[in-house]
Image (cartoon, helix red, strand yellow):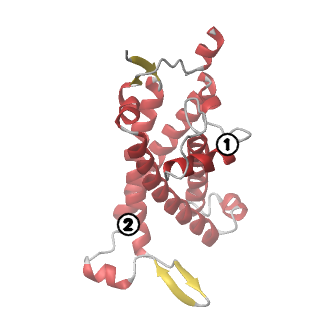
Amino acid sequence: MRYIVHKHPLAIRWFHWLNFPLLAIMIWSGILIYWAYDPYAIKLFGTTVIKFFPEWFYHKYKINARLAEGMAYHFVFMWLFAINGFLYVLYTIVSGEWRYLLPQKHSWRDAWLVLLHDLHLRKTAPPQNKYNAAQRIAYSAVIIMGVGSLLTGLAIYKPAQFSWLTFVLGGYKTARLIHFTLTVGYCLFFIIHIVQVIIAGWQNFISMIRGFEVTDEQIVPIVSKKADDEK
C-alpha cells in the first residue's frame, strides 16, 4: 500500500522556486561586475595558486567589460532577492516552519553521520523529521549568508550613504571581499544541494513541486505549527 506524505507548504515552494532564478541572476550579474576589476586570488607563500578568472580565460572566451550591464541587473534584482528572502523568513516565523530549519543540539554530530551515509560509509542515516541535520545547517547558513550579502552589498553599493555600515564591515575593500566570498559560498551550496537532491531521489525532488511525497511507509510528519497544535 502506498501513502501520501505532505512535506512542503505552498508558500515554501513558491519562495524556493522564486529564489533559485533570483540568486542565479544575482550571481551572473555579480560576475559581470567582478570582471571589470578582478583582484582576488589564492596565494601560498607569495605564489598565486588560484587566480579567479585568469587572463587566458578572458582572451579565450573574448570576455568584454560589461560593468554597466552587470550593475543594472544586480541592483534591480537585489531588491527582489531581498524581498523574497524577507518574506520567506517572516513566513517561517509566523507558520512555525523555523522549528524544522534551525539546527538542533546534536545537528553537527548528526550532519557528519548524514555525510557518511551519503558516501556509503555508513549503512543507516540518523533519524530525521522534515529535514536532516545537514539540511538544517545548510539552509540556516544560507539565510545568514543572504543577510550578509545584502549588508555587504549595500556597503559597497553606497559607501558614502552607508558609511557607518561600511565602517562596521571593515571598510570598502573588506566588505567587497566578504561579498565575493559569500558568492563563492552560494556556488558551492548550489553544487552540494543538487548532489543531495540527486541522492535523495525523484520523490524528494517532486515533493518540492507538488508539496507531497508518495511512499510505501505510513509516515505522519509534523509540517507546521498548526499541525503541531492539533496533535
- Residue at image coords 29%, 75%: 63
Callout 1: SS? helix
Q: Which residue matches tag 1?
A: 107
Q: In what quadrant of the picture does the N terminus appear?
A: top left
Tell me if residue 55 can be seen: yes
* Residue under the image location 57 percent in, 46 percent down: 114
User: Does the residue at mark 1 contact the one at mark 2 (Cβ under 8 Å)?
Assistant: no
Residue 77: percent from left, percent from top: 42, 48
Relative to 143, residue 44 above or below: below
Among the two numbered marks 1 and 2 on one chain, the one whose residue lies closer to the N terminus: 2
Nearer to me, 83 or 55: 55
Per the image, the residue denoted by label 2 is 32
Residue at (70% x, 38% y) in the render: 104
Residue 54 lies in what quarter of the image? bottom left
**Amino acid at circle 1:** Ser
User: What amino acid does circle 2 point to?
Assistant: Leu
Give me the C-alpha separation between circle 1 and circle 2. Answer: 37 Å
> Residue 178 at x, y = what percent?
60, 64
